[in-house]
Amino acid sequence: AAEGNVPTWWASLEWFLVAGFAGAAFFIDRRIPRWRRFAFMWLIIALAFFIASADEVAQIHETVGSYLRSQVDASDTLSHLVPQGPKDSPWIIFYALPLAGLGLASITFLFKRLNYRPPLIIYCIVAAELYAASIGLDWFQGCSEAVQRHWAEVLGVINSEGLVEATMTLEETLENVGTSLLILSFAGFVFDHVRVSVADAGMVPEQAEPPSIDEGSAGVNQSLS
């Protein structure tokens, strides 16, 4: 997709907001004994989205992907081990495993941490699915023209270039909606703790925290009402 335009800057801002709320959640969990040892996951998530925010504008992933592809192609050994992947989106092949690992670890952590309020988990799961779909569309955009024409014919689209442009718009939309859902989820977590702390100003943070997954989810609505 085209970089350096208004949608790109908007996406970068959304990534940054996710990083900010994850950073705030990190400081919240550092003060809660039963979650203190897992707080580093918030920091990892915040760092990942901060990098993504800068990357969205600077196209770091495209530069790194192209460089790694050239190095792999120059090696007789590596060229046979690393799949070619989409020609114009080489970053997907090299980022696939790290992204999958980070995504799985993050979803596992968030599922446990946000279990006191199910909608927050649902937002994260849907966001992950939308991100996966947008990466699939990016893959298609990086494929050869022959592959794009083939799929255009399969879908009954006369102009393959029009199909590619449509996938670019859809990719940006899915990505932005997914990021918006993460903002809602992380902001909800942070504001839950702020609201409880304000409502129970005389309590220490550990006591003011919404019920954890071990305590069930029944009490959180009562605490926040």
Image (cartoon, grey):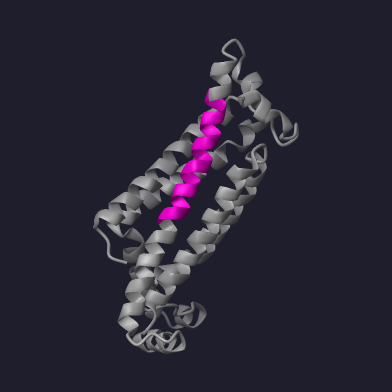
Q: Is residue 120 left or right of residue 140?
A: right
Vertical position of residue 186 compared to residue 6: above or below: above
Vertical position of residue 175 compared to residue 85: above or below: above
**What's the residue at 43%, 73% (across, down)?**
139
Give the dominant element type of the magenta stretch: helix, strand or loop: helix
Quarter of the image where one finds residue 60: bottom left
Residue 85 spot, x, y in % from top left: 45, 78
Q: Quadrant of the N terminus?
A: bottom left
**What's the residue at 53%, 36% (across, down)?**
188
| Residue 62 seen in render | yes
| Residue 94 seen in render | no
Q: Is residue 178 left or right of residue 214?
A: left
- Count of picture labels: 0
- The magenta span reads 176-194
Vertical position of residue 202 compared to residue 155: above or below: above
Residue 46 spot, x, y in % from top left: 46, 42
Magenta-span inclusion, residue 213: no
Q: Quadrant of the C terminus?
A: top right
Magenta-span inclusion, residue 181: yes
**What's the residue at 43%, 71% (across, down)?**
137
Quarter of the image where one finds residue 142: bottom left
Q: Is residue 11 left or right of residue 224?
A: left
Quarter of the image where one finds residue 32: top right
Residue 52 spot, x, y in % from top left: 39, 52
Instruction: Name the one closer to the observer, 118 or 85.
Output: 118
Q: Is residue 40 left or right of residue 18?
A: right
Question: In this view, which residue lies farthest toward the top?
Answer: 202
**What's the residue at 35%, 72% (across, down)?**
166
Residue 51 spot, x, y in % from top left: 39, 49
